[in-house]
Image: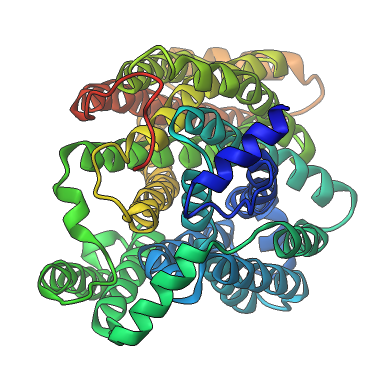
Amino acid sequence: MASAAHGQQSEQLPLSLAGGRNPWTIAVIVSIATFMEVLDTSIANVSLRHIAGGMAASVDESTWVLTSYLVSNAIVLPISGWLASVIGRKRFYMGCVLLFTISSFLCGLAPTLGTLILCRVLQGIGGGGLAPSEQSILADSFPLQQRGMAFALYGVAVVVAPVVGPTLGGWITDNYSWRWIFYINVPVGVISLALTYWFLVEPKAEKEHREEMRRKGLHVDYIGFGLVALGLGCLQVVLDKGQREDWFGSNFIVFFSVVSGVSLVAMVVWELTCRDPIVDLPLLKNRGFLAANIVMLAVGFILFGTTQLLPQLVQEIYGYTATQAGLVITPGGIGVMMLMPIVGLLLRKVQPRTLIAFGWIVECLALLHLSHFTTDVNFGRFVWARIFQAAGIAFLFVPVTTAAYVGLPPGKNNNASALINLSRNLGGSFGISWVQTWLARRSQLHQVRLSEHLTPYDATYQRAISHIQHALPGHSGQAPLAALNLSLQRQVGMLSYMDIFYVLAWAALLIAPVAFLLRKSKPGAVAMH
């Protein structure tokens, strides 16, 4: 009876792709590709040292494997809504899954770092169109009162994938090869394509709308797309290369910064005056939608930044293997899975902005807790700290995703989904780049400060050398000095990581009030229109 009721509800929604079936079946199917796509934003985190070693590159350069994916993903996001409208959501969605699957296979075969980055760009292009299509499909396949729970299911895939990714990537890297972190996408992609083909049905209303668009003539905003690609592409080069090139002390960085700035400003001007803009910037005039994008940008910044930082911390400072580093992250994903349905239910009774503000407070406290760790912390404390932090993320993603669309004009679901996902990916890219830059700068500062005490006339230095000589009987000459230097580097690294967690904690607290700029809505009816 329940299934029949769901099917009847889906038939009453003119843009539903359920085709009379239970819409929860559609929700599960689209979440498969969601999980696969978002997983690839983080699965390589714990494998970067292995990728760098296998391709004769530095660890610094290997981070481009992460950021190249995010930026190409971000470039496609703004135009994905328009493309889905022109091609049809089902065909566009299947095309994205197909490109993602093929490029994943090519990533595994890549012989050089340059080739791998190129394949990751193609992979990001394919993945970029998935999230907006999936969110639009969910919004149009569920009645208002069920969309909170539908987005909770979708949110599990989006938020859990980045925290499961490091563990899976670490285990595959330690036991097989880093190339298999890309090969595993192939069977998942094939399954997703088959299920989409069999179960999703293009609604009659969507076909009629697409035919009407073609009769009126398609006006492709080539200039807008070119400006978006150039602006975001150059911005990512600046973020990736800035620290290595000494930021604005380098003419290379200055040039790309100017090109990026000019391109993005020109894009805004062009899109606001263009007849058929490829990026629907007027949506940002809606105060609530703008606030939702700001919050989602911050969510991406902290989620991706910390997911990249924690595995690096435990490997560098504590000597964990790739698998152990991943296991630090995974329990957080389990916590999110348990909390997501609860958050979905709370949305029926509590204002989304209240849940979002609560989520930021939890995130702030969790990051402050991490900022007080020392070199003596054990595996269990790291696991619980990550669970604590993941709890905050659970109270952010679903309320933001559902509340963002309140008060938007009808028919804007595709465009709104593109912009909200663009904010998340840009936040992730900014977060990863900022974390690496700040880590390098704080390391330099702490190195200088601690090295000031490395003099034979310093009492602390003398005690440290005496302690090392006592602990290493029979060793003389440079051995005590080498041991002292290793201890110094460990302390420098630990202090630098703790500084980052401290800054992120205060950033989370400062962003919390933005939640109250979201439109107030009736609990239980927070959904797309």
In this view, 340 is above or below 142: above
Please provide percent x and percent y for residue 261.
Answer: 18, 67
Taking the spot 31% from the left edge, 55% from the top edge, the residue there is 412
Quadrant of the image containing the C terminus: top left
The residue lying toward the viewer, choosing from 256 and 159, is: 159
Examine the rendering and report whether any part of residue 393 can be seen. Answer: yes
Please provide percent x and percent y for residue 339.
Answer: 58, 18
Quadrant of the image containing the N terminus: top right
Q: Of all residues shown, which one is farthest toward the right?
A: 175
The residue lying toward the viewer, choosing from 252 and 466, is: 252
> How many marks on residues?
0
In this view, 127 is above or below 145: below
Taking the spot 34% from the left edge, 65% from the top edge, the residue there is 245
Please provide percent x and percent y for residue 7.
Answer: 65, 41
- Left or right? Give the position of 384 relative to 446: right
- Left or right? Give the position of 47 relative to 453: right
Examine the rendering and report whether any part of residue 443 can be seen. Answer: no
- Left or right? Give the position of 399 relative to 295: right
Q: How is the image coloured?
A: rainbow
Please provide percent x and percent y for residue 460.
Answer: 47, 14
Name which quarter of the figure residue 438 lies in: top left
Taking the spot 50% from the left edge, 62% from the top edge, the residue there is 128
Taking the spot 42% from the left edge, 32% from the top edge, the residue there is 451
- Left or right? Give the position of 70 relative to 18: left
The residue lying toward the viewer, choosing from 224 and 87, is: 87
